[in-house]
Image (cartoon, rainbow, N blue to C red):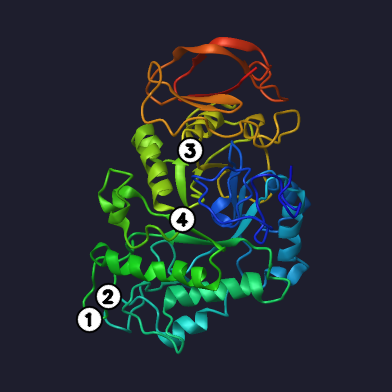
Amino acid sequence: GTEPDGNQPDGIADVGDAGCTACDASTCDPNAGCTGIASFAPAFPRIASARIGGSQTYGPAFQAWAAKQALVVIGGNWEGWASSGRNREAVIHSIKAQSTIGTKVIEYGIADGINTANDNEPGFSPAVASRNWYLWRNGAGGTHVAFSTSSAYWQTNSTEYVPADANGRKLEDAFAVYVDKTYRTAGTANAAPSLDGHYHDNVFFYSWIDGDFDRNGTTDTGKSFGLAWRTGERRYFEQLKSIDPELIRFGNLDNMYSLGITDPANTAAAGPLDGIMHGAMLEGFMGKSYSFETWSSWAATMKEYRFRMNMSIAPKLAVCVHGGMAANGSDPYTATPYQAMRYGLASVLLDDGYYSYTPDGYPDNVLFSFDEVGGNAGGPPVGYLGYPTQPAPTAAWQHGVWRRDFDHGIALVNPKGNGAQTVTLGATFKHLTGNQNSSLNNGSLVTTVTLQDRDGLILLRP
């Protein structure tokens, strides 16, 4: 079926569809033809990507690969990006034209530092300098606070203590105006009217660098000015909302541990950033040395995932990034081909978010795929599981293994540290069929399965 105007498949309504009304994705029938970003509800598995490294050319191969995903973050966030014949609208139009699920594309941006050695956004940096939106060591001048990773970057001050410009804007809301005009509405080859929204990197709950935030001559700790920092960051998202409430507002969000909380429902501790973003990224979901799953536990990383779900408003675009991913589906902590990928994907399927797998560096030209994510040659189609038939589980199902049921199958997760486990499924299911991992993805029927430690599995209903 199609929506009333025939442009999108069922469940992916277009703004302006005749007879459609806005509704919340969490309560909306995905076939009801709801209007607006809040109703975006692609089928499962939900896949996302953030390929913001490499050449950032985003050629035809990338476009075809990205079209199979529900949410795509692109880079090219510099004013000279289109100088080599690149065209942002052509890239985004091609992705969407090839998509069968209404793929959303958002633009990467970062506001917390100015690169003084290689200024790629000269349309914004003069405003920072003229309004003195830098963070200083003491007072409102003297010694700049530099990034801990590079002295070429001067840290900006997101708090309310900086002066406003002639329009009443400060650093963050001025940046929102700049990025939307530069990359969406400017009418240039660098601007794409089809862009769905904006990604704000480094949405920290407090500055990770100390400085004189209130400019009273004394160096402050970043944590002591956390509320002021978050209040300033909210300006960015409020500004995007005022420009167009249908623009996706997305942040690479800080972790619960920085606030000292352990309850993922306690979003008030991160106020006033709660309730303003449509989505949030967990960059170190798995596969990295700094991932909670690596140095703490699977339970800890799942709490961080659910915290981002709770921080977001509909359609709750929580993206979990599995880093260090190889083309054979292994990561630095599980060498068995495809096992780490299954583990990460099935873990994300336990809630309603999006799985993003990437090799280190987020390259835009390393574009492998897997049968389990859907849309891979010889494998099941995009969205093959349909929708969940039960809420996100809150406890293990059998022998420490977690399970969630969907229209067309089930997802199983055996967390790290639980040891190999054999579980009885209670019915007959079948393995996926695909061109990869033929010893497992062979379509065979099963009533019991064994999962290794740190493993996951997706099975289909026969």
**Residue, disc 4:** 252
Q: What amino acid does circle 1 point to?
A: Gly
Q: What amino acid does circle 2 point to?
A: Asp
Instruction: Assign a secondary structure to mark 1.
Output: loop
Q: Which one is in front in this view, the residue at disc 3 or the one at disc 4?
A: 4
- Residue closest to the eye, 289 or 61: 61
- Counting residues from the start of the chain, the first of labels 4 and 1 encountered is 1
**Residue, disc 1:** 217
Crowd band around label 3 with a 10 angstrom C-alpha radius: few (<14), some (14–19), many (20+): many
- Counting residues from the start of the chain, the first of labels 2 and 3 encountered is 2
- Counting residues from the start of the chain, the first of labels 4 and 2 encountered is 2
- Residue closest to the eye, 208 or 400: 400
Q: Are marks 4 and 2 in contact (CB under 8 Å)?
A: no
Marks 2 and 3 sit apart, C-alpha to C-alpha, by: 36 Å
- Counting residues from the start of the chain, the first of labels 1 and 3 encountered is 1
Marks 3 and 4 sit apart, C-alpha to C-alpha, by: 17 Å
Instruction: Assign a secondary structure to mark 4.
Output: strand
Marks 4 and 2 sit apart, C-alpha to C-alpha, by: 25 Å
Q: Is residue 136 left or right of residue 69?
A: left
Q: Are marks 1 and 2 in contact (CB under 8 Å)?
A: yes
**Residue, disc 3:** 287
84 lies above or below 21: below
Give the quadrant of residue 441.
top right
